[in-house]
Image (spheres, grey):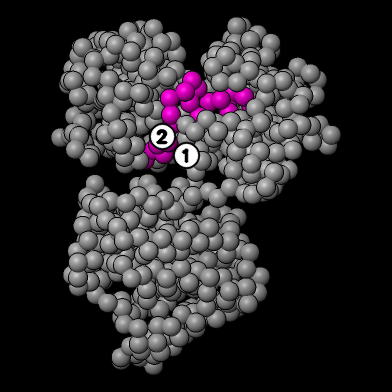
Amino acid sequence: MAYAHAGRTLGKVGVIGSGQIGPDIALHLAKVLAPHGVEVVVVDISDDALARGRAKLEGKVGKGVETKAFKPAAAEELLAALRFTSDYDALAGAGLVVEAATEDERVKGKIMALVAARCPADALLLSNSSHLEPERIFAGVPHPGRCAVAHYFFPAERNPVVEVVPGAETAPETTAWLLSFYEAIGKLPVRVGSRYGYAVDPVFEGLLQTSALLVERGVATVPQVDAVAQRALGLGVGPFTAHNLTGGNPITAHGLAELHGRVCAWYSPPASLREHAAAGTPWPVARKGEVVEVPPAVEQAVGDALRATYFGLVCEVLDAGIVDPSDYELALEQGLVLEPPLRAINALGPRAALGLVRRFAAEHPGFPVARCLVERGEADRPWEVEHVRRADRDGVAVLTIRRPKVLNALDADVFAQLERHLAALEADPAIAAAVVTGWGTKAFVSGADVGMLAKVASAAEGEAMSRGSQRPLDRLAACTKPVVAALNGLAFGGGLELALACQERLVVPDALLGQPEVNLGILPGAGGTQRLPRLLGVEAAARLLRAGKPVDAAEALALGLVDVVVPREELLVRACFRARELARGAPPARRLPAGPLEGVPEALPPQELGHLSRAIDALVCRAVLEGARGTLADGLALEARLFGACAETKDMRIGLDTFLREGPRARAAFVHA
C-alpha cells in the first residue's frame, strides 16, 4: 500500500529529530498516512530523545483514544506505522523527509547530506526551519529543485498552518505539489517567499519584544500584559504564556537579534528575554484561574502598544511582498490564534491604525511604518480580504470558497465576491465554464454564518437577508457558462443551496449533505425550499427539509441530490472535465423546471418531528407546497417572505441562541410558537 497524490506515491516518509516538534509532525503524518500503509520513520542520534519523543507521541495518542478523537483500531494502526530509530539507513526509499532538528544551519546542512545520500534522487527534502532561508539550509544538497522549507507551528499535529518556503532553486512543480499535498492532508499551507524569519515568526517574536519592554519599563506586569494581549489581539493565550508553552525563549532571543540586522533595526532581544533564555526559566505568568486586575490606563497603554506592533509588523511583511495578503490573514488567524490583522485594521479604520503605528514608531526608533499602511491609512481605504479564490485550469475557472475557521460558511463578503467572480468569468473569452468548491478536506460550505443570522431582528430584515442570499445564487443559476459544484466535504444549509444552483454536483464519498435549518428554528432562505423540490420531487424534498438530518454521499446519489460520487483525489479533475463537456454542449444530468410542478399534493404526509418546532415546520410545508405550484421566481419570493416570518417566532430566537451558546449538537427547547 502507499499514498498517491498528484503524480507522487509515498510508501515511506521520514522525520529527523525527536525533540520539541519532530514527534508532533510524525504524529500528524502517521495519522493521515498510516491508513494507506505508509511507514513513518523518526530518526534522532540520541536514544534518550527517541525515548522521550516516542513517549510524548504515545501519550497524545492515548489521550486521543480517551477523548474519542481516535478509535482504538485507528490508534493501533497509527502506532504500528511509526518507527523510532537512530539509524539513518532506515530512511532508504523514503519519498518525503522533514528535518526538524535544532535551528542551526550547519547542523541542518549535515543532516541534509546524510538524508540525500540515502533517499531517492526525486525524494522531497523539507526543513522545518522557523527562520533560516532555504538557500542556506540546502546549499550543496544534490537536486535542489526538490528542497523547500515546511515550517510547522505548535502543536504541529493540531495547528493547521504550514509555511511553505521555496528557495531560489526549488522547482515550481515541487512548490505546487507541496501546497496541494498539505491541503489534501488537512493543513493550511501558505506560500511565503524566502526571507529570514518568513512571514509569521517576525510577528510572534515582535509581540514578545514589545511585551517584554512594557514590563521592563514598568508599564505593566507579565500577567497584565498577557491578559490585555488576549483582549486586544484575540490571542488564545498571551505572548509570555505562549513562549512558556512552546519553550520559545531561546529561539526568539536569537531570532530577534538576527531580524535586527536582516529585516528591521527595531527588532532586538530585550534584556529580560535574554536573561530568561540564558537561565532556561519561564516567565512568571498568572496561575490557572487567577484573576488579573488591569487598571483602565494600563489596559489602554498596553493595548495600543500591542496593536501598533501587530499592525506595523504585518504591514512591513506585506510591503516585502513575500506573502499574499489573504493568505497572511489566514496564517496569523489560524497559526497564532490572532485576530485577523487586515480585518482588525478595517474595524479600527485604516487612518486610525496608521496614526497608532506612527505614534508607536515615534517612540521606538527603527520601527517600520509600511508603505501599504501609509497609502491605505491616508486614503482611509480598507483592505478587501479574499474569501473566494479563482484559479483557471484549461478554460475552467475554479472558484474556491476559503474560510477554514468556520468551515467555509457563507456571509455577505462571500456572496459579493462570488457575484464579482461570476461577472468576470462570464466576460472572459478564455473561460468556457466554472467549478465551485470549498477549501480543505472537511467542508464544501457548512452553511450560512449563524452570527449573521442571529442579527435578524424583524420580518423585514429576515426577508431582506433571504433575498440578499438568493440573489448571488440566482446569478449563479443563470450564468451563461456552465457551473459545476465539486463537493469536497459536508454541504449544509446555504452550502447545499449553493450546490443546487449549479448545473451538476460531484461529491466525495465521505461527504454529508443536508438542510439542517429547522434545527435552528428557521427555514432555508437561499432557495432550498424551491430548488430541492424541483430536483427531487415535492415529497422527497419535504422529508429532507422537515427532518433537518443529513444524508451521506451514497444516499444523496440514490435520491438524485448529486450526480456522481468520485474519489477525493479525482474530484477537481473530474469536475473540470465535466464542466468542459457541458460547455461543449453535453446535456446536463437533469434540469430544474422554472415553471409550476405537476401533481403537487394538497398536503404533505404526516412526519415525526421530535423536538423540532411545529411552528417552523408549518412554514416549511407552506414554502414547499405553495412554491411548487407557482414559478421558481415566485417561489423564491415566497421563501424570502416566509424566512422573514420566522423572525416573528419565538422558536427562531430559541434555536439560534441555543446554537451560539451550546453548539450545533445541542437540541433547542422549542415552544412551537
Task: Answer whether labels 2 and 1 touch (C-beta < 8 Å).
Answer: yes
The local secondary structure at tag 2 comes to strand
Q: Measured along the vertical axis of the image, is residue 107 above or below residue 351?
A: above
Residue ID for mark 2: 191
Q: Is residue 147 left or right of residue 53?
A: left
In the figure, residue 80 lies in which quadrant? top left
Tell me where residue 502 appears, x and y as whole percent. 33, 67
Q: Amino acid at mark 1?
A: Asp
Q: Which residues are magenta?
A: 186-207
- Point out the image quarter for the C terminus: bottom right
Q: Residue visible at 37% across and 12% down? A: 108
Q: Measured along the vertical axis of the image, is residue 590 above or below residue 564?
A: below
Q: Earlier in the sequence, mark 2 or mark 1?
A: 2
- Point out the image quarter for the N terminus: top left
Tell me where residue 386 appears, x and y as whole percent. 49, 50
Badge 2 local density, few (<14 within 10 Å), some, or many (20+)? many
Residue ID for mark 1: 324
Q: Measured along the vertical axis of the image, is residue 248 above or below residue 484?
A: above
Q: Residue visible at 22% across and 71% down? A: 588
Tell me where residue 105 appears, x and y as whole percent. 41, 10
Q: Residue visible at 57% across and 76% down? A: 463
The local secondary structure at tag 1 comes to loop
For residue 191: magenta?
yes
Q: Is residue 108 left or right of residue 387?
A: left
71 or 579: nearer the viewer: 579
What whole-number distance in Å separates the C-alpha atoms at marks 2 and 1?
8 Å
Any part of residue 91 in sight = no
Q: Amino acid at mark 2?
A: Arg
In the figure, residue 608 lies in which quadrant? bottom left
Tell me where residue 620 appears, x and y as whole percent. 47, 79
40 or 614: nearer the viewer: 40
Q: Is residue 453 left or right of residue 69?
A: right
